[in-house]
Amino acid sequence: MERPSPHSHAVPRNPRPEYFIAILQSDVRNWGWLGGSGGRLRVWVPDLAIDQDFGHVLHRPFHSRRRSKIFLIFVIARRTGTVYKLPGTNNASFVGSDIDMPFKRRLPSCLVAISIIMIAAAGAACAQEPFRLTPAARFLLGMEWSYLWLSGEMLVPAGGRPGSGSRVDVPAELGVDQGEATSITFDASILDNHLLNFDYLMFAPTGIKRAPRTFRFHNKTYLSGTSLETRLDFNWFRLSYGYKLWDLTPWWIVPRVGVHHIRYSATLNGETDEDGIVSNTRSLDGTYPVVGLETRYSSPYGVDFGLELEGIHLITAGFLSMARLRLNWEIYPDIVITLNGSSRVVQYIEDNQRLNNELFYVLSGWSAGISFAF
């Protein structure tokens, strides 16, 4: 492409070199980058490259997935009295007049520093290649912090003997109804169509309350008015595989299959009618194969919205369901911020003894996290 003639927008030439400031304003897809060598400064923005020494405006292709808002870039250049109007803008570069030499020497470095600070403060993404272990796959490893509200009940006998356990409303009678949780997440996209998800939720709420009635837990009797300290411990593993069956850009529809495994334990510390003050713990395990569906919408600015539904009913052994609304925001190449709202429902029933262990819980809340791609 031909360079614009310096005489097309020329003003009377000044034999002395001067500095000027060009202000570029644009609403484009990405931020450019600043660089220079050998005393030359070049400022790159999408589709525009400005050469500091000569001020030529070149049209260059620039590809990126990101978008940016309107921004300003201050460009320093040395001129010999010629002014160019930059295509695609309403801003013209202009020639400085009488500037004393010490100030003129400092002016370029000062304004370049201002430019870099402005770009960094605005969260501009440099033209950086994402890091990948293999070009055929993208992996995300991260952590999430949650706050969950809990409701439900449990029946925990000892050895299946009738009379060795009572059904207990956990929030109302034991005072356990909310707490913080932590999750480890791993996501993989292989050959663009195969999606693998793993997360491990660790949730251990506690509560202290006086028992409103007499009940039995794991063959121990807790009298009405007894002060009890209760701790529940959920270790919830989830593994899911999905195939991008419909890619109706920007929408995705992904059927899923997977499995959930829950390691649950309940501990009651307090005075019992039989043995005085004891710590009484019971652990249960449940595994649930699930089927599900995920819908995802990819919006501009690196933001994705997703809705996931999974569940199964095992007839005599209980059921499990999960609904999650996700927001993923790739704020920088290989750095993803997540915000989720979720609800998990589980009913677990043993069917191998006269009085079975049972539990029913609903865990609902919000979570936020960060993931790193590789």
Image (cartoon, rainbow, N blue to C red):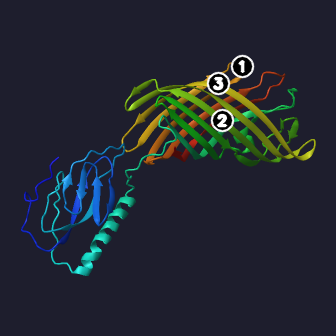
Residues at badges 3 and 1 in contact (C-beta under 8 Å)?
no
Q: Earlier in the sequence, mark 3 or mark 1?
A: 3
Residue 149 point in image, percent of width and height: 62, 42
Please name the amino acid that badge 1 sits on: Thr
Per the model, the C-alpha gap separating discs 3 and 1 is 14 Å
SS category of the residue bearing label 3? strand
The residue labelled by disc 3 is 289
Q: Tell which of 119 and 133 is nearer to you.
A: 133
Disc 2 or disc 1, which is closer to the eye? 2
**Residue farthest right in this picture:** 274
Tell me which corner region of the image, top left, top right, bottom left or bottom right, holds residue 176: top right
Q: Which secondary structure, mark 2?
A: strand
Q: Circle 1 is placed at which residue position?
A: 316
Q: Which mark is residue 237?
A: 2
Is residue 317 at all visible to an observer of this figure?
yes
In the rendered view, does 81 fall on the left or right side of 23? left
Residue 164 place in picture, x, y as percent? 87, 31
Inspect the image, locate mark 2, and give the three-letter code of the amino acid beneath it.
Phe
Going by the image, does 265 lie left or right of 83?
right
Residue at 14%, 60% (x, y): give it. 84
Q: Residue 97: x and y, percent?
A: 15, 75
Q: Considering only order in the chain, which callout, 2 or 3, is on the residue closer to the N terminus?
A: 2
* Residue ID at (65%, 30%): 260
Q: CA distance from mark 3 to mark 2?
A: 12 Å
Q: Amino acid at mark 3?
A: Pro
